[in-house]
Amino acid sequence: GRVLREFSPEEVTANMYTMVDVLLHHFSLELQRGRSVQDIMLKAYTNLAFFIWTHELLPLDILLLALTDRDDDPHALEIVINILCSKELPQRVKLYLVNRGQPDHWMFSGTFKRCDLQKSLGNHLSWRERYPVFFDDMAARLLPVIPLIIYRLIENDRFDKADEVLRIYSTFLQCYPLVFTFVRDILAYFYGHLPVKLIHQLLNVLSTKKVPFSESFSQRVVPVCPPLDYFATILLGLVDHVIPPLGTSYRSAQFGDPSSGPSQASPCKGPVASPPTNSVAPEGQTPFYQIQDPGTYTQLILETAVIEILSLPVPAIEIVRSLVEIVVHIQPTLVQSSSGLQPSSASQCCVLPTSPSGGSSDSTANRTSSSSVPGLSGSNFVWRSAYTFQQLSCLLIQACGLLLAQLPSEFHAQLYAETARAIKESCWLCDGPDRQLDSAVCYALLDPTWAAQDDTSTSIGNVVALLHAFFGNLPLEWMEGSTVVINHLRPVTSVAGLRIAFRILSPLLHRLVNAHNLFMKALTALLNVVTDVFGRNNSSQSNGVVAEASEIVDIIDFLHHIVHYDGQGGPVQGNSKPRADVIALIGRIAENWRPDLYHLVIHLTPDPNSSIYAAAAAAAAAVSHPKFINNSS
């Protein structure tokens, strides 16, 4: 102690990591000499406590950080646990909580009374004239340190000790400004590895009275997948508070008070009551680990839904399967629940656009309707929401895509597999003449809002709409696996399947232009699907009908547009031209296509005799490097 007093606080702090290394080295030496671990641990803690609490010479937060960073030594975390679970530190934390008051003390009127600096900071820091407000107490300086310790304990499978630390400091951690982020990130990073008891302890850190959890959430943190109604209720909360409103026409004004019964139903005739005022567009395309604690009620609702999903101790596949099941069967469920409230002939609403087909007899006849799924009851959805059931079905799909985009990558991989399975199991891809198949798929994929308007929604259209909502909210750095869903769909054997693949992935290509590697990966996946159907070495046919190249002229036009868009780096101009590596990719894959289809893309190949872009590139190279061109010739 006398020696340490000769050093300045800066020198003590700067050498803290060295002191920890020496301490752990002597720990191992004492073990080699035959002393017991308990005796050495007791001596080490007693000496540290003497310098921390009696002389106040060691900064506790830096000491705990140094010990936590040395978790490669099996005894470092034990010393940390002994310090955190000692009598002195919880007493100091309790005193801090009594003086500081409630975690939201800043909301109360009056001047905040600070404690004496000598008592709050100790000798090591109290002499300073300047200090951050957040770190004006020795206990407060531990707020950003304890979450890191819990992370490290979980990483080292010390679940029992992590549970004990959380139990002791759960009230204290409610003062942590990023407590919501702390709970969400632990649940996300260690999803599937946390015991149920530890999940409950993590949730206790949050102020459950202030966090809008679902009514039955506390009963769902068990190793059993909840029913579909539970997930549908979460999605409905996102629709009401997070998803931007469709317009000014809402079901609550059409039908008035739900208690008045279905007799007051009337068609939509004009602008009526507005939606909840807190329906604001969420922060999209941001990884969850970059989002701090929610600052608005909209963010709070979304982040609470994410925490609820991550807290369920069931495999990700079961959760994703339930969400996809809701999306596939949402329209039949809502229609059945609303059959006594609004006839299908009165389903025209002024907010949704009119379908170009107008729900014609062809599209209606070719549609294969789905029945509602067991476990999903939509009887209360229409009354609880401010939308008609046509609008609500579209918004629930958007909410599902938004929610899945906030979850870790384990959920993304399962989503790709489940959506591909739902598409493959569709009746349209299992039976029926090929021409009827193509016609029905084209209509179903045109726009899910039109399908909902005409009451002609299909499982394929809903699944594609879910993927679009998911991709639209997914950060660019997580787009690497977007082509996995296409790989699950292969091999594709019909033009209908080809169109489904393009409808899923082609809207992403414009966004991926700024990430060229991802663009090339997505384009390669789509070109390979074309090879499945129009390959030179396979006579691909579906139900005895050979696919004609003229059936996908619009897809070839899209490929022509997107490669020029990529070459320009934005909207296509008169002088836009494809990149050389894109032309080489198309030429390499198109060599395996049938001649009638290869003829349509020959201008996008690297052959100077057939492609004006390749010829222009060769001419430019000849001007720039004439000697190289002459020698090679």
Image (tube, rainbow, N blue to C red):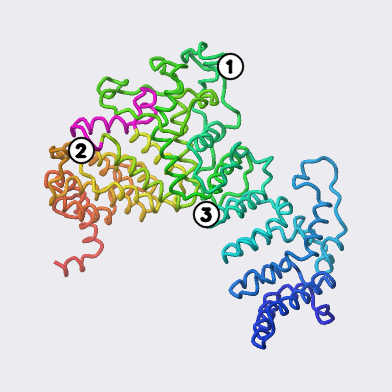
Element marked by disc 2:
helix
| Residue at horizontal 61 percent and vertical 74 percent from the top | 74
Residue 11 image position (x, y, % from top left): 75, 76
Q: State the residue position of label 1.
A: 259
| Secondary structure found at label 3 | loop
- Residue highlighted by disc 3: 191
Disc nearest the viewer among 2 and 1: 1
Q: Amino acid at mark 2?
A: Val
Q: Is residue 298 magenta?
A: no
Determine if the magenta segment contains residue 455. Answer: yes
Question: Of the residues tagged 2 and 3, which is closer to the observer?
Answer: 3
How far separated are the C-alphas under marks 2 and 1?
55 Å
Q: Identify the residue at image location x=37%, y=29%.
A: 371
Position above or below: 364 against 218: above
- Residue indicated by mark 2: 553
- Whether tag 2 and tag 3 are in contact, CB under 8 A, the answer is no
Q: Are marks 2 and 1 in contact (CB under 8 Å)?
A: no
Amino acid type of the residue tagged 3 in the rendering = Tyr
